Every structure is written in structure tokens, then in C-alpha cells.
Image (cartoon, grey):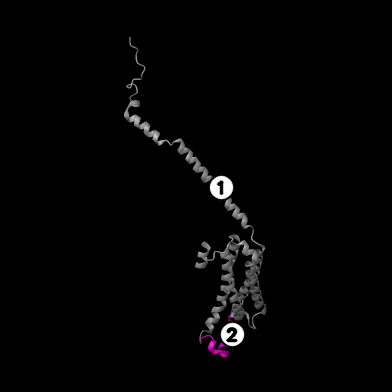
Amino acid sequence: MPQPSSSPDPSEHPESSSPDSIADRRFRRADLPSQSDLDDADLAAMQRQSADKDAAALRADQEGAIGEPPAALRQAWLFWNGAAVAALISVLYGFINLGTVTDAVRQYLQQGEISDPQNAAPDGQVDSLASFFPPAMLIATLVLLAIEYPLLVATSRNHSRNCRNCFATVVVVNLLCIPIGIDLLFAHPQISGVIAIVGWVQFALLVLSVLCTYRKAVGEWLPASMRMRPPGAWRAGRH
């Protein structure tokens, strides 16, 4: 007798032998990543992690190389604080005695009309100028202080050469205004001479402050200057 065949009957599992099921299995196998793809993804992830660690280490080395601000910057901060205190004393005195200061400025301008008519204030504007200049100059003093403070702080905290240079520029403007303010507002018999001395103390402390920011230690601590070189020097540097 012939033995029954042991091969599976396709009719028992019709879905396994149909063309559609075979195509589905091939499609699912095509979607699965191969072992080489997995290895490449792991290698790329390891490279990204290594690059991130190297970048973090470089930033840490750079931050450590910066170090603490030099003592000259702390001295500049102390001198500037003294100058700010002197300026606030002058401003406070000026506003408290604004009427006396305004009268003194008015008399000063009127004397200018008599002694030097060509360079004196225009006729009819003495009163308006005498009322305008004292409060305007006192407020300008506060504005300059408000600009200098964040620039000096940013020089130390942000390790910024540009902020140092901007601070020096504003201080120079302030230094130019101080003698004018002393002469116009406080150099009068009815004004206490102590205020003029306070103004010159402010002048001297600002000079010391800005000089401290340009000491050699500060220049070495701050980042290198990014000055633009002439085209000829730039071409020479390429060769």
C-alpha cells in the first residue's frame, strides 16, 4: 500500500502559501534594520557622545583658563565707587539748593553779557538758560553713572574687552563734563567751595579707575583684540 504523504496540506494553512502572505512577510523583513545598520547607528551615537564630551571639556578648560579678574579690575571698581559717591554728593547738593544754583548761574550769564557781549548768551534767554542748565547737568551726571556701572560690571563678569573700551569712552565724556559743571554750577561765592572740591575728587577717582582698567594685567586677562588689519597685512599673513 502506498504510504500517506507527510507534506503539509496547503489547504490546512491557506494563508501561509498564498502569494499575498509571502509578499507581506518579505515586506516586513525589508522594514527591519539589518545588523550592519544597527552597528552603524551605535557607532554614530558613540561618536556624538564623544564629540559632546570633548566640547564640554574644551569649554571647561577655557573657563578655567580665564581665571579670576585681576586685582587691577577690583581696584578700578573701588575707585569708581568713590567717584560715584562724590558725584551723588554733588547731585544731591545741587538739587537741594537748586534755587541758589539757578540764581548763581543767572548772575554768571548776566555778567557775561556785560564783560563779553559777543560771546554771551542771546538777549532774552538768560533766564531760560539759567533754569535749564543746572537740572539738565545734574541729571546728565546720573545718566553717565548709570551707563558706566553696567559696562564696568560686564568687563569683569563677561570677560569683555569691548565693554572695557566702552566704559573708558563714557568715562572720558564724563571727565570732559566735570570741569564745565564745576565752573558753571558751583564756582560761585554763594556756593560752598567744598562742592567744587568734591567734583575734583570725582574727576581724580574716575581717572584712576579708567587707568586701572588699562593696566597690563587686565590687558593680558581680557581676550585678544579683534582689530581689523589692513588688506596688505592680511594678504601677507596668508603667505
The front one of 120 and 209 is 209
Give the amino acid at mark 2: Tyr
Cα gap from disc 2 to disc 1, whole angstroms: 70 Å
Give the amino acid at mark 1: Lys
The answer to whether residue 146 shows anywhere in this view is: no
The front one of 184 and 160 is 160
- The relative height of residue 61 versus residue 13 in the rendered view (above or below) is below
Q: Residue 94 placed where, x, y %?
A: 61, 76
Residue 203 horizontal side relative to residue 119, left or right: right
Please tell me in which quadrant of the rendered image residue 210 appears.
bottom right
Magenta stretch containing residue 197, yes or no?
Answer: no
Q: Residue 186 placed where, x, y %?
A: 62, 79
Q: Which residue is drawn at 63% across and 64% down?
A: 218
The answer to whether residue 131 shows anywhere in this view is: yes
> Where is mark 1, residue-wise?
53
> Where is mark 2, residue-wise?
108
Q: Residue at x 37, y 34 (%)?
A: 27
2 or 1: tag closer to the N-terminus: 1
Magenta residues span 102-122
Q: Which residue is drawn at 56% across and 49% down?
A: 54
The front one of 173 and 226 is 226
Which type of secondary structure does the marked residue at label 2 adopt?
helix
Residue 126 horizontal side relative to residue 90, left or right: left
Q: Which of marks 2 and 1 is in front?
A: 1
